[in-house]
Image (cartoon, helix red, strand yellow):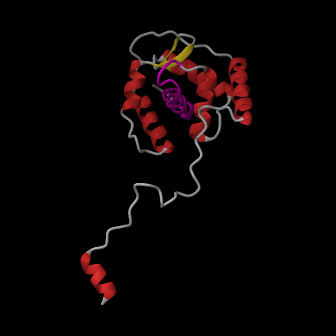
Amino acid sequence: MYPVHDVDAILLLALSLASKRRPAELVEIIAAADLLQGAIPSETKLSDSFYRLSEYGLICAQDGGYTLAPDAQQMMAGQRKKAEIPERIFGIKENLADYHLKDEHAIILLTVEQLAAAITEHQAAKKSGRSWLAPKPKPAEIDSKRPGTRKPFKSFAARRRKEG
């Protein structure tokens, strides 16, 4: 696939996050992209990316949503689980560069207005605190007196040195 854009890799990563159990709606894809990189790509870049990736058969429309095609699922399965987001994006871009068009596929045409409406809806949900893809807050301090926790093991020799 040539040329490969950053937004293509971000869209594939966001789709893999948003469509794990069922096809994702546009708002869910936008929320996943926002969660991944802290910013949402522009509407025109997203529209072009949907076009390119669907033309190559990597994403498809299904049941009113969007999901990864089998080839894209294989690309995503090959990623390291503990890799940081920039490393994952770089790996996806490498896979996209090596990918070749096999057949003709149905092209997904999304207008800038559709994407702008989805971005506005996501931002409104984010402001009201209803975004289901928002990262969960971590506890400020872990209580060491929880049940099931023990003191660290001290060897017999360490205790003798301390006493002697």
Q: Count all numbered tags in the image, as a single digit.
A: 0
Measuring from the top left, give residue 152's x and y in whole percent: 36, 67
Residue pictured at 65% horizontal, 34% vertical: 40
Task: Between residue 139 and residue 56, name the one nearer to us.
Answer: 139
Instruction: Tell me the quadrant of the picture where the N terminus can be found.
Output: top left
Q: Is residue 98 visible to the viewer in this orientation of the structure?
A: no
Measuring from the top left, give residue 125's x and y in whole percent: 71, 30
Q: Is residue 16 magenta?
A: yes
Residue pictured at 72% horizontal, 23% vertical: 116
Task: Between residue 130 and residue 4, name the one nearer to us.
Answer: 130
Principal SS element in the magenta part? Answer: helix
Magenta-highlighted residues: 5-23
Measuring from the top left, give residue 47's x and y in whole percent: 63, 21
Left or right relative to 33: residue 21? left
Instruction: Tell me the quadrant of the picture where the C terminus can be found.
Output: bottom left
Residue pictured at 41% horizontal, 11% vertical: 103
Measuring from the top left, give residue 84's x and y in whole percent: 47, 45
Residue pictured at 41% horizontal, 58% vertical: 149
Q: Is residue 152 above or below residue 137?
A: below
Q: Is residue 97 above or below residue 105?
A: below
Q: Is residue 143 visible to the viewer in this orientation of the structure?
A: yes
Displayed quadrant of residue 78? top left
Q: Is residue 39 magenta?
A: no
Left or right relative to 111: residue 140? left
Displayed quadrant of residue 160? bottom left
The residue at the far left in this view is 157
The residue at the far bottom in this view is 164
